[in-house]
Amino acid sequence: MPNNAHQRTCEARAAARSAILAGFFAVNLCIAGPAVASEAATEQERVVEAMRLMYVAATNDDLAQFRAVTTPDFYAFDVGKRMTGDQLMGFAKGAHAAGKVYVWQVTEPQVYVDGHTAWITYVNRGSLQDATGKRDLSWLESAVLRKDKDTWRIQFLHSTRVPTE
């Protein structure tokens, strides 16, 4: 009989340890899980913000701001050709000088972050206003970004205009 009592005591202690460990892990998952998810969401938001800042720079013909959100080796596939950052900004500046006003908005972003690299796809919904009036336009776009210190910088941009119906 003493062995049965001893065995039940050992089993009770083992069950208590298991319950404590399970509780500890559950609490850690509740605490650490959202923190990791929150950190990932923050990184994704920062990637989207980098894209928005690029459009602010292009809207204002601000080459310094554009360079602040892009890598030195940035290039884009846009309007059917490969362009450096300076060429892309020159294209925007020329359009503005010709009286064209573009509005660009990053919508429906999907962001994937892997360490110091991020990839984003989104629909750029905007408009073009010129002497003929205002037209709503959309582009399907994607970009690759690199994290430089704590800043996301755009390395590559691809833009395809959605045909108007």
Image (cartoon, rainbow, N blue to C red):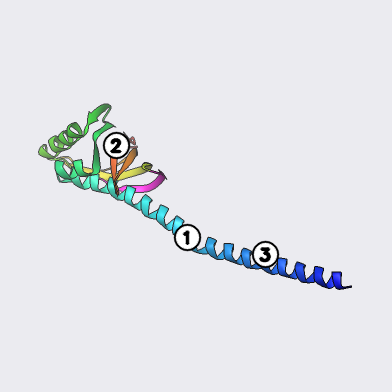
Q: Quadrant of the C terminus?
A: top left
Is residue 112 visible in the rendered image? The answer is yes
Q: CA distance from mark 2 to mark 3?
A: 50 Å
Q: Could you tell me which secondary element the residue under label 3 belongs to?
A: helix
Tell me which amino acid carries mark 1.
Pro
Which x, y percent locates residue 21?
62, 64
> In the image, is residue 144 above or below residue 45?
above
Give the extent of the magenta segment: 104-115
User: Considering only order in the chain, which callout, 3 or 2, is on the residue closer to the N terminus?
Assistant: 3
Q: Residue at x 25, y 34 (%)?
A: 74
Q: Secondary structure at mark 1?
A: helix
Left or right: 3, with 49 as reference point: right
> Is-magenta flag for residue 152?
no
User: Does the rendering let one see residue 62?
Assistant: no
What x and y, as percent, mark residue 58?
A: 19, 42
| Residue 143 quadrant | top left
User: Residue 148 sits in which quadrant?
Assistant: top left
Residue identifier under label 2: 155
Residue at mark 3 to residue at mark 1: CA–CA distance: 24 Å
Circles 1, 2 touching at the beta carbon (< 8 Å): no
Residue designated by label 3: 18
Give the overall secondary structure of the magenta segment: strand
Residue found 15% across the figure and 34% down from its top: 90
Q: Position of residue 1 (x, y in %)?
A: 89, 73
Q: Residue furthest toward the top?
A: 81
Residue topped by disc 1: 34
- Which sits earlier in the primary sequence, circle 1 or circle 2? 1
As drawn, is 59 to the left or to the right of 117? left
Q: Nearer the viewer, residue 123 or 163?
A: 123
Marker count (numbered): 3
- Left/right placement of residue 139 relative to residue 14 reads left
Three-letter amino acid code at the position of disc 2: Gln
